[in-house]
Image (tube, coloured by chain):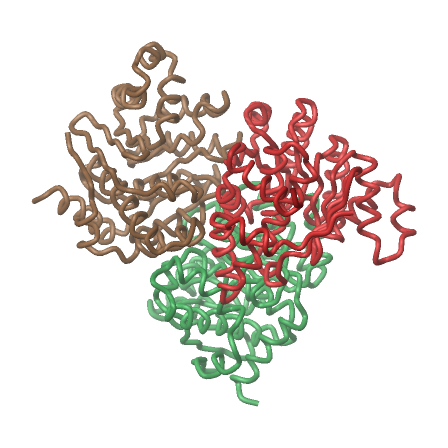
Chain colours: A green, B red, C brown
Amino acid sequence: MTMEKILWQQVQLVKQKSPLVHNITNYVVMNNTANALLAVGASPIMAHARSEIKEMIGIAHSVVINIGTLDEYWSESMLLAAETAHSVNKPWVLDPVGAGATSFRDQVLQQLLQYQPSVIRGNASEIIALAKANTTVTKGVDSTAQSNDAVHAAQILMQHYHSTVCISGETDIIISPQQSFFIKNGHPLMTKVTGLGCSATALTGAFIGSVEDKTLGVAAAMALIGIAGELAVQQSKGPGSLQVNLIDKLYNITEEEFIQNLKIEQK
Amino acid sequence: MTMEKILWQQVQLVKQKSPLVHNITNYVVMNNTANALLAVGASPIMAHARSEIKEMIGIAHSVVINIGTLDEYWSESMLLAAETAHSVNKPWVLDPVGAGATSFRDQVLQQLLQYQPSVIRGNASEIIALAKANTTVTKGVDSTAQSNDAVHAAQILMQHYHSTVCISGETDIIISPQQSFFIKNGHPLMTKVTGLGCSATALTGAFIGSVEDKTLGVAAAMALIGIAGELAVQQSKGPGSLQVNLIDKLYNITEEEFIQNLKIEQK
Amino acid sequence: MTMEKILWQQVQLVKQKSPLVHNITNYVVMNNTANALLAVGASPIMAHARSEIKEMIGIAHSVVINIGTLDEYWSESMLLAAETAHSVNKPWVLDPVGAGATSFRDQVLQQLLQYQPSVIRGNASEIIALAKANTTVTKGVDSTAQSNDAVHAAQILMQHYHSTVCISGETDIIISPQQSFFIKNGHPLMTKVTGLGCSATALTGAFIGSVEDKTLGVAAAMALIGIAGELAVQQSKGPGSLQVNLIDKLYNITEEEFIQNLKIEQK
């Protein structure tokens, strides 16, 4: 089977399984990420109360932790969720929003990393900051050439925490011990809609909660939102309508659209 | 007057009164429910600080409590709001989101029920869980036939808490001591938009804050969102545009559209 | 240069500078205001944790404080942010949502005012309540004629706190010691979309973080959202599509559209 067909198969698996995805995410994107999850066939749960996190993770297929609007209460919830997911072996994805911006973020991220996220998804500067904040690997990152910083940082994170790492950007780079993917889908207008990176993370949560091969799942999630975004841009007058059209396209994308537009390289 | 005309009259009463509706609701739907309230002519207040709840309820015409993203702080706010609404005789509606999912939710819901919500609106599994969580009625619910579980649970809640109960689903069932309504409006695509149930609850809050007969108000609110949803689906390419078109249609629905599309039975 | 050209120049300055705008705002509007900021070329930060506020303000060009859904934790964050912005001389804008509705709001607002917001933007009743809550000026406000209440209140606030004050409404009135502007853009349907006032405040934050003359910046921000709103209404079927079309128009508005539609008077 071609890689195109294999990734489309992952998209179908999410629809078939309809995974419960437990999100502890930021206020800005809760509505959009819930709608993105529904559009691909998943069922979102948004819950952060420390009193119920363990039970929620018990019924969920996967967990999404996004620190965008963290505070002292929410960071405790996130740590409890990460610890629980790790201990009961539920796949979880970390979105280190704003890594490197403040020492509070970096401290919370360092603690979260101890629970070995199945997947880490961030932009290049967040992935670099995340690896740098890990003081034991600082030299490794600092000594890399500028252009390779994010890939090197991703490799360090992968090795230390046994995570699949996704660096999102003009090219999405997905790195795991077994394989790497380079995906060139998406459109610059997507950066003018708040939280599409967070939506990519949420979809990643749905895919790793539904499919066997987690790295394939991440690749399929990133390909799906990239292609849906490209197609949605064609019908949009600006970022307002893009936000709406993207949800529509995540919902009604066809196999033909997915396969004809996918731009992927595997290494 | 026909039932169709009577319900449309309720819709007009909301526009005339423009009720202040005080919402303590979940983060995911705050924007959408505020826009749904504005679209039907109500004025939303979103406020949860314990330091101001009593004053806010003093100026509001009705109160909406939705536990979707509750935590320990917010549950205290909700209890204070329910107690205040009950003691000063303001109509209030409870949306027991995720009832039965965790013991924390069930405990908070049990406490909220003591303040006798004017209306309880949830899906079948939430209404069943709510009645079950009330340990004094467990047997009653457990012994009912599967297909009638939700109606039986609704009747138990109605009797214990003097509430009008609305079970939303393919058919919305509204049960009060005096009368029952069965409404068959709505469209399956509406389940792919996050929080349309929460919007139905918010509209219910607007209607019980505006009209004399609370049960008629609930019926009119559910009919309105169901019909507006059906009509909006016809112009939508997916759940993203449905979310937008539904707000437009709540705003510009005509008497003819309402009356021609209403599918209601009264018992 | 004409005033039209000068204001359009301010719009261009925001795009060129792409200011980081740190928002402590309400849950209802976070998504929309983030998208409005992105649409005009700014970069939103939404962060409220007391543990990171000082660092966040260190990297931001301006600060937006909007008390819409305040509580005891968030009000502490807002006070810390206002104090920090004031002490390190970063421009900041205050949106006193619901001023006068509860004593809690008024107490928090009184404390915030001590840190001399660069700009205060609210509707007439909020501006009046804000000046009234300042007990030392109660008489002044009470003694004004009804129709001039808001302008008089704005002048009092301007004098006491050295703020530029913007009263938004059918006519937006912007008052500073040096000059006043009266802007008659906008459309009544905009009041049916939740939080467009909050978006105006957020854009004000972007402009005062980018331009030299803060009062010109406020005028340009208010003109921009008013004109974009008018143009967006022409393509909208109701408030749902207006919310979407407004973001599109903030993004793709042309110099010609801005200049031909601006209705401004300077005094």
Vertical relation: A185 (above or below) C228: below
Measured along the vertical axis of the image, is residue A159 above or below residue B26? below
Which quarter of the picture shows residue C122?
top left
Q: Position of residue A255 (x, y in %)?
A: 53, 81
Residue at 53% x, 54% y: name it: A66
Residue furthest out toward the bottom: A1
Residue lying at the far front in this picture: please name it: B1
Side (left or right) of B242 relative to C84: right
Question: Residue at 14% across / 44% down in the picture?
Answer: C6
Query: Horizontal placement of A90 versus C214: left or right?
Result: right
Q: Nearer the viewer, residue C247 or C241?
A: C241
Residue projecting furthest to the left: C1
Taking the image as drawn, is residue A267 in sight? no
Q: Is residue C63 above or below residue B142?
A: above
A84 or A42: nearer the viewer: A42
| Residue A107 seen in this snapshot | yes
Q: Nearer the viewer, residue B73 or C267?
A: C267
The foreground one among A237 and A145 is A237
Q: Quadrant of the N terminus of chain B?
A: top right
* Total labels drawn: 0
Report x, y in % for residue C199.
Answer: 37, 43
Q: Residue at x 58, y 58 (%)?
A: A64
Please state the horizontal and vertical placement of residue B103, each as a whole percent of the image. 76, 45
Residue B152: percent from left, percent from top: 84, 48
